Image (tube, grey):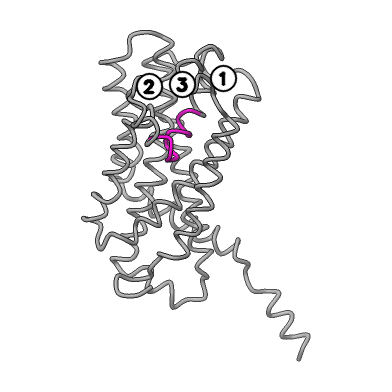
Amino acid sequence: MITAVASKAAALPSLLSLGLARGGTELREFFRQKENLLFTVSLPALLMLLLGTVYVKEPAAAQMFAASMIGAGIISTSFVGLGMSVVADREDGTLKRLRGTPMPFTSYFIGKIVLVFVSSLFEAVLLVVVGLLRFDLELPSSAEKWLTFAWVFSLGVVACSLIGVALSSIAKSTRSAAGVLNLPYVVLQFLSGVFIMQSALPESLRTAGSLFPLKWVCQGFRSVFALDDGYAVMEAAGSWELGKVALVLGAWTIVGLVLVSRTFKWSNTSR
């Protein structure tokens, strides 16, 4: 009997396998909904095209602007998009139904992270294509630059996903979630060097923007796409500060984990 019980336990799917299976379900649902592709993925590329056409006139400026927009687009998907997705799951009863199944809390979030990683990568590729076609964006030529892109991308997605999930607990519906999640995101784009270089902002606004992940994600990507390291002088600190980028994004990942563990709700009436 003990052997049979042990064999049955060994046959149970792991947290990771359940999470990956849930991630596949999330991706299928996401790509079936055309409005997701239109608004969640295409909007940053459209903004990049419109704003870049109006304001960007020099190749170096195009590189920096494209890098910042790639960072902002990824944060849009992870912070705003994932937060809205969790609110929708709570509102339509998906979370309540999942709570009654053997699927653990952790596997649900692994599935969401899979969704965000894939959709963010899809969005980043779209933004790069727009940059190549419209702004003559030059891609990094060294493995070191692409490695920097990979870890900034990964830390940025995870940290901002967790923050988005934490803030989603404030919203009671998808309608209210739009304001809860989009307002800080729009404000932070102006404070984080997306539309205006941080060095041009008053010190108080630079300090405020530096407290949040968006600034550091965009700065990390600017270090990747800069034509040379001389452009680092345009940053508020006069350097890329990649060590600080990793430290801040890592810290926000920990903060996000704590906030999610304390604030996540399976329904609007329970914790």
Q: CA distance from mark 3 to mark 2?
A: 7 Å
Residue 43 position, x and y percent, is: 30, 35
Left/right placement of residue 243 relative to residue 133 reads right
- Please, what secondary structure does the residue beneath circle 1 have? loop
Q: Secondary structure at mark 3?
A: loop
Quarter holding the N terminus is bottom right
Instruction: Name which quarter of the figure residue 229 lies in.
Output: top right
Q: Quadrant of residue 25?
A: bottom left
- Among all residues in the image, which is located at the extreme right? 3
- The single residue placed furthest to the front in the displayed view is 204
**Quadrant housing residue 212:** top left
Disc 3 + disc 1, Cβ < 8 Å: no
Residue at the (49%, 61%) spot, across then down:
22
Instruction: Specify the amino acid type for callout 3.
Output: Glu
Numbered tag placed on residue 109 in the rendering: none
Numbered tag placed on residue 140 in the rendering = 1
Q: CB under 8 Å between callouts 3 and 2?
A: yes
Q: Position of residue 179 (x, y in %)?
A: 23, 49
- Viewer-side label of 2, 1: 2
For image coordinates 32% across by 46% down, the residue present is 36
User: Please, what is the three-letter code of the amino acid marked with disc 1?
Assistant: Pro
Residue at mark 2? 197
| x and y percentages locating residue 257 in the rendered image | 50, 57
**Residue 11 percent across, percent down from the top left:** 68, 74
Which residue sits at x=37%, y=21%?
Answer: 197
